[in-house]
Image: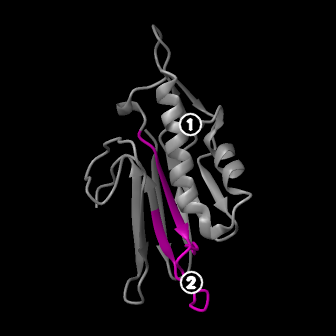
């Protein structure tokens, strides 16, 4: 599983990820390929990495995300991404491709994201956002479930930085 690491400070943000995907085939060993882009720039406001399923809706997840979010206002990105990802993963499960334990998925966003409830008069602050069906405020480990949860942490003036990881665990 991919480890995505996100860093947010008052001066800059960064996302680190690999490009490897694992292809599991019946009767054969796992095949590893360094072919997927797991980092996506969101409207020049944030950088997002993902871990979980490399393909959604029949195309690579990065292309799927861009296609799904491009027509939307940036304030709609996170709610739409949660709902659309839930439906895409449910379709994979219904088609018999994977069982629930194999459908964990998470996005990690760092930057200056816009939310629907943000006051347009207030300055935007650096933030870190997770959108996942396998992580959440009530889970300490990777536990896939049907619904996606959105969690936001804004960097406060008294904090130097925020650091978060999704996918593999990062020792603090």
Q: CA distance from mark 1 to mark 2?
A: 31 Å
Residue drawn 48% across and 35% down? 90
- Across and down, in percent, residue 167 comes to 40, 47
Q: Who comes first in sequence, dot 1 or dot 2?
A: 1
* SS for callout 2: loop
Query: Residue 5 versus residue 77: which sits nearer the camera?
Result: 77
In terms of image quadrants, where is residue 101? top left
Residue drawn 54% across and 61% down? 78
* SS for callout 1: loop
What residue sits right under mark 2 in the picture? 124
Q: Residues within 10 Å of mark 1 (few under 14, many from 20)?
A: many
- Across and down, in percent, residue 128 comes to 46, 68
Magenta stretch: dominant SS? loop
Is any part of residue 17 visible from this angle?
no
* Label drawn at residue 16: none
**Vertically, is 86 above or below 6?**
above
* Highlighted range, magenta: 104-129
As drawn, is 151 to the left or to the right of 12? Answer: left
What residue sits right under mark 1 in the picture? 54
Is any part of residue 57 visible from this angle?
yes
**Vertically, is 51 above or below 103?**
below
Q: Quadrant of the C terminus?
A: bottom left
- Across and down, in percent, residue 152 comes to 43, 69
As drawn, is 10 to the left or to the right of 167? Answer: right
Query: Residue 20 versus residue 42: which sits nearer the camera?
Result: 42
Residue drawn 52% across and 82% down? 125
**Vertically, is 140 above or below 42?**
above
Q: Quadrant of the N terminus?
A: top left
Residue drawn 60% across and 92% down? 121
Taking the magenta stretch, the answer to whether it contains residue 58 is no
Q: Residues within 10 Å of mark 2 (few under 14, many from 20)?
A: some
Q: Residue furthest top?
A: 27
């Amino acid at each position: 599983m991919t480890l995505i690491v996100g860093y947010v400070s008052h001066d800059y943000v960064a996302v680190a990820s690999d490009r490897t995907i694992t292809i599991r085939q019946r009767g054969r060993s796992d095949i590893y390929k360094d072919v997927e882009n797991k980092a996506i720039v969101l409207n020049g406001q944030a950088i997002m990495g993902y871990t979980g399923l490399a393909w959604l809706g029949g195309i690579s997840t990065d292309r799927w995300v861009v296609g799904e979010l491009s027509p939307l206002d940036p304030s709609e990105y996170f709610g739409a991404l949660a709902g659309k990802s839930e439906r895409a993963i449910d379709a994979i499960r219904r088609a018999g491709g994977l069982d629930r334990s194999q459908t964990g998925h998470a996005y990690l966003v760092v930057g200056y994201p816009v939310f629907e409830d943000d006051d347009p008069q207030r300055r935007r602050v650096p933030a870190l956002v997770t959108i996942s069906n396998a992580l959440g405020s009530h889970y300490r480990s990777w536990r896939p479930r049907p619904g996606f949860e959105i969690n936001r942490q804004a960097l406060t003036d008294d904090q130097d930085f925020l650091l978060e990881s999704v996918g593999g665990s990062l020792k603090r």
